[in-house]
Image: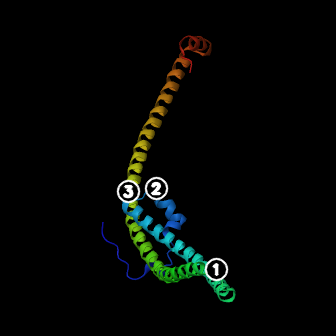
Amino acid sequence: MKSIDFKDNIVKRNKIPLLIYTPEWLQLFNNFKTKNLTKSAEKLEELINREKNCEAELREMEKRKKIVMNKILYLSNDINDNNNGAAIPKLEEAQKELLGINKRIPELLEEGETLPGLINTQNTELLKETIKRAYELINEHKSDSEKCQQEVNELRQKLGALIQKKVELDERVNKLYNFIHGMLGAADIDRFDERFMKDE
């Protein structure tokens, strides 16, 4: 199939939502996905999940940072004011944890800044795959619809012929019955009806 190119950022310009969360997209394509469409949708879902996890981890790190900083202040005061040497290993451990947090927060912030762009790009890729699949399905459905119409036309012709045949047969039955009725009269015809007429 031909490649699909957009002139500019169509997702932002047309305010196209995240396709995998759009009810119409799910309804139209969930049971009609190609390998490429499935892969593209899964990649988008992974990026969205990564963004959620990144935000959750960042909140957790910021919360933890406050706790660790308070712990460091408490332990420092305990060491300085109470000359508590036993608190030194705990202080060193807390300082080490704070360094890890301080290293991780910028990483999360940086990743958090890049993810919306990656999500937008992947949503655009999924849109391209969706357009390709939509045209494939349109062509398939149109072809199937034409076959159905052909079958309907054939059935209409058969039905028309059967209706015509039934009308002709009913007409012939009436003519035959009227003929013998006219020849024999009502009294004799009732007797012959009982003998010869098949029960319906």
Q: Nearer the viewer, residue 22 or 39?
A: 39
**Earlier along the polypeptide chain: callout 2 or callout 3?**
2
- Which label belongs to residue 140? 3
Report the front residue among 132 and 60.
60
Q: Amino acid at mark 1?
A: Ile
For this orientation, the residue located farthest to the left is: 2
Side of 102 relative to 76 (left or right): left
Q: Tell me the distance, in whole angstroms, between the alpha carbons under discs 1 and 3.
A: 61 Å
Which label was assigned to residue 31?
Answer: 2
Q: Residue at x 48, y 27 (%)?
A: 172
Instruction: Residue at 44%, 64% (x, y): give it.
Output: 42
The residue type indicated by label 3 comes to: Glu
Q: Marks 2 and 3, Cα distance to the nearest angstrom?
A: 15 Å
Above or below, 198 against 47 in this view is: above
Q: How many C-alpha atoms fall within 10 Å of the one at disc 2: few (<14), some, or many (≥20)?
A: few
Q: Where residue 73 appears, x then y in whole percent?
A: 65, 86
| Secondary structure state at the residue bearing disc 3 | helix
Residue 193 position in % (x across, y down): 57, 14
Q: Mark 1 — residue?
A: 67
Compared to residue 35, the image places residue 116 above or below, namely below
Q: How would you rate the neighbour count of disc 1 (Cα within 10 Å): few for under 14, some for 14-19, many for 20 or more?
A: few
